[in-house]
Image: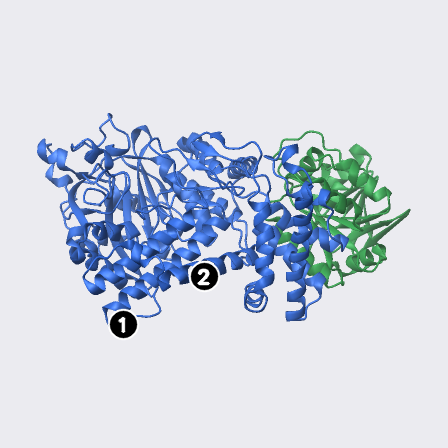
Chain colours: A blue, B green
Amino acid sequence: MNQVKKSPIDEVGKRSYSTFAKINGEHPFKTQVPGGRVEYQARHKKGGKVAFFNFDLAREMGLIPKTHPNHLNPELEQEILRTFSLVIINEFDVINKVKIPEEDIYPYTFMATRYLQLQHPDKTGKTSGDGRSIWNGTVRNNGITWDISSCGTGATKLSPASNINKKFYQTGDPSISYGCGLSEVGEGLETLFFSEVLGKNGFKTERVLAIIEFEKGLGINVRANPNLMRPSHFFGHLKQGNVTSLKQVADYYIQRQIDNKVWTQTNFKNDKEKYHYLARQVAKTFAEVSAKFEDEYIFCWLDWDGDNILMDGGIIDYGSIRQFGLFHAEYRYDDVQRYSTTILEQRQKARYIVQCFVQIADFLTTGKKKSISQFRGHETLKFFDKFFIECKDRNLTQKMGFKKNQQDLLLKNHRPLVTKFRKTYTYFERAQSKRGIHKVADGINRDAIFCMRDIMREFPQIYLSRQAALSPQDFTEIIKSSYAKKQDLKLTDIRKKQINRFQTSYMALVYAIEKETVTPRTQVLLELTMRSSVINKYDRVTGDSITYIVQKVQKLRPRLGAEELYQLACEFSTYQNLNPDQKKVSSEIPPRHKNIMQGFYSIVRDCREGL
Amino acid sequence: MKLVFYSGGIDKDNYQLDKIFIELLGKKNPVVTFIPSSSYLSEQEFKYFVKHYSKFKISRFIHFPIDVPFDRILFQEVIRSDAIHLGGGNTFYFLNSLRKAKLLPQLRAFVKKGGVLTGLSAGAIMMTENIDMAAYPEFDRDENTVNISNLSALKLVDFLFFPHFKNSTRYDVVFKKYSKLHQKIIYACPDGAGIVVNGEELRFVGKCYAFADGHKFSIN
């Protein structure tokens, strides 16, 4: 890598992997939202090695041909390093006149985007944004434009440390951690394993394209998504009352959604219709995603700044992402200065984000920024509330194992039955230990005592076998989690009633489908048995299990090549794919990998009820 | 004692064995439990299993992976079921999991009480005295990924069973030698063939082979 100065654009078509040459720092956001970014020159960072490359994602993005083998040949490795192994020339470097060989400097600048972050003292987004990331650019393939961004590319002036301490930091400054602009390979691995699993299970998420490794465990983690805009990209300009920049961000975002064919409506009578359509889309997305987070026990730390989530509800920044094994409704992450939100508070945070978008729509239409409280009762928020409940009902029927057409029938013709079942389901799901709130490794929690996946998996097959309901004792034996103590499991009259209600309302839904589809009851139960055994698999990943798996991978790393890591990530996400309609085929993996995978399975099992 | 040894093959290959299995059940609306050799992607196998036996008008099934913890209630249903099928896969891993879950004596008791036990490939080997056959011949064996040395299995019959047999000299050499050395009868069955044990009666279905005292015999 000694030819950076040469314009990569000149090389398109000449390089073996010519699409990489288009990823050069240029990005439409730079010109369309001038007030939304800070630009940096960058230099090549030497000593990097490709630790991971996502062949599957690269094919989807058109970076490698469809027929490309999962093999990292020297040219491809060079191309990845040439494109992504970079560090910004930041304010510290400029002020201190740090000498950089000219041939190491990239011809174009890279942007760090501005967005609102609650960690920043000014709380208006004037100083906050990408603190240790830059945007590499975009690629377009099969009608979809992808954004690519890298983390660990140097300290920008938008980091909290820079603003709290009122100084520019040298990249890698050992006196600070987060603000030093670097990232670790472990962070990339955590994102990789978690995002691939969640992506396979229908969550929208950023995905890891590549991890470049340097000495001392440091790394550059390259992420991609069809649209990396977050609500917080809008909120900074909203807080500042900057209607010009806000409009630019909104128009930029809308155009991308239209170009990527995400939006069904593409023509609007006027700005009012356009921006309220945007608010409505956000309401739909955030109702859906917050219901899914709640039902799949995803803790994403949604907050008023709209920082930890993408506009399409996609998960970003896996540092604070958790998937709980049980409904640990009172877990709060301890972030030193404050505690995080809980899993149940996410709905309200999502609603507030929607409310902000209604305010944005009004602001952009009228030119006047009204108080957010004026939009509390707006019809878009009413739609959010209604759609949230509908999503909860659908999610529950899906968890039971009903097929899409059966879910539709239940929601259309038997909604009260679904609601009734959801109420009793929630009673068990949210039951908590008498132990009360206590400290856990990184925060506080109050343990959930029942494992809903176990009862949802076993109930249909036991009912099918016995052709009778379970006794309260048997029901409790199945549903109890390892957190439940004797005193938590006392069979009170209320508990007995709820056990009875759970089974009768579950069966009421089975009878409804029996009638609606003229299918024998045993057949309906048998299908539920098969589907729910996949959906409610005994061993599902949790945040803790991902942490331990990454620790294991880190230990194995010196002997694990980029291709092997890719194979392991694929195999692991296949094993954790809980879609009953997906035909899963186990790939042939070398015996050494089988042992590694066995280790992963055992970690997932051991942590299955945790945080 | 009611046992069915399946070698392997696709659905229609085993039609005869399946028919006999249904006769052995001798009951309307039976409950059949599927025990996979490993929980990994076993839901998919369970789906195929259900699809296959649904053709015989069976509609009550239990999926019972044993390499993950299970509760007492589901286990009671398994033991109460009319038939248990042991799936195919890695025989060493399967035996290790059955032993860890303390299921070997429970399965023997199930058979003793009149339950029908069937096994396919690794599952069929499991019903014999030991799983030596999973380690033979060297060119066609399971990998002992769990490093177990105690290979004794359910010991429900006094013969050994070799599935997926290919009638060729190189297999013959190995099995003749083994049968002479260990003084054991090996029944080797190609895919689609198998053995049915009903009380004292031993019935071979399809083309089977026996190896005894260093000799090979053709059956059927």
Q: In front of the other: label 1 or label 2?
A: 2
User: Residue B78: horizontal and vertical position, in percent?
Assistant: 75, 46
Q: CA distance from mark 1 to mark 2?
A: 25 Å
Indicate the position of residue B154 as horizontal and vertical percent values: 78, 38
Q: Residue at x 24, y 57 (%)?
A: A370
Q: Which quadrant is the N terminus of chain A positioned in? A: top left
Residue furthest top as drawn: A175
Relative horizontal placement of residue A412, taking residue A41 as reference (left or right): right
User: Which of the pair A97/A458 is nearer the observer?
Assistant: A458
Other residues around mark 1 within 10 Å, as few (<14) / some (14–19) / many (≥20): few
Q: Secondary structure at mark 2?
A: helix
Q: Quadrant of residue A337?
A: top left
Of the two numbered discs 1 and 2 on the same chain, state the one appearing first in sequence: 1
Q: Can residue A376 be seen by looking at this rendering?
A: yes
Which amino acid, by three-letter code, is at mark 1? Phe
Residues at circles 1 and 2 in contact by the CB criterion of under 8 Å: no
Residue B81 on image: x %, y %: 78, 49
Where residue A386 is drawn, which disc sits there?
2
Output the chain of dot 2: A
Mark 1 lies on residue: A268
Instruction: Say what amino acid the circle numbered 2 marks.
Output: Lys
Task: Identify the residue at the far right of this view.
Answer: B200
In the foreground, A322 or A421 = A421
SS for tag 1?
loop
Which picture quadrant has residue A151?
Answer: top left
